[in-house]
Image: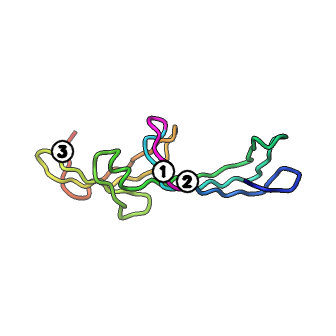
Amino acid sequence: MLTQPAEGSLNHVDVTVHDIPANGTTRPLPVTRLTVGMDGLKTSGDADEAHARSVQATACLSYADVSNALGVEVSQGDESGRINATAGLPLVGDVTVSAAVSAASGNRIAFTDVRAEQGELLPP
């Protein structure tokens, strides 16, 4: 519970939550850590509700959870903001690709700029 002077406002609030479980299709992956920063937080008249002028959030997912969801082994990439994914493919064996990772609309993860790092990908 937050305690604050009578005016019902806070300049800045940071909240960190760990180990949020998956929840079906609305949140198919567990969240290892969620950090939320809120600026200009004001409570409503009865303090059951609050509104922030701005909010910034960062969600961290574990490599193991992402690997299980995708069905391939995912690990930290060689560059910041990239992951490596390794899968065994018929005819060519193990292939490792690197991809840039970013947030996409609808609380989704986007994998872009995919590059073969080890092994060969078959032509499309």
Nearer to us: label 3 or label 1: 1
**Figure quadrant of residue 43:** top right
The residue that label 1 is drawn on is 31
- Which amino acid type is shown beneath numbered disc 2? Leu
Residue closest to the eye, 101 or 67: 67
Nearer to us: label 3 or label 2: 2
Report the span colored magenta: 18-26
The residue that label 2 is drawn on is 34
- Which amino acid type is shown beneath numbered disc 3? Leu
Kindly report the secondary structure that dominates the magenta region of the rendered protein.
Answer: loop
Cα separation, mark 2 vs mark 1, equals 7 Å
User: Mark 3 falls on what kind of element?
Assistant: loop
User: Mark 1 falls on what kind of element?
Assistant: strand
The residue that label 3 is drawn on is 122
Query: How is colour applied across the structure in the image?
Result: rainbow
Cα separation, mark 3 vs mark 1, equals 34 Å
Cα separation, mark 3 vs mark 2, equals 38 Å
What percent of the width, then of the height, locates residue 105?
52, 39
Crowd class of label 3 (few under 14; some 14 to 19; many from 20; radius 10 Å): few
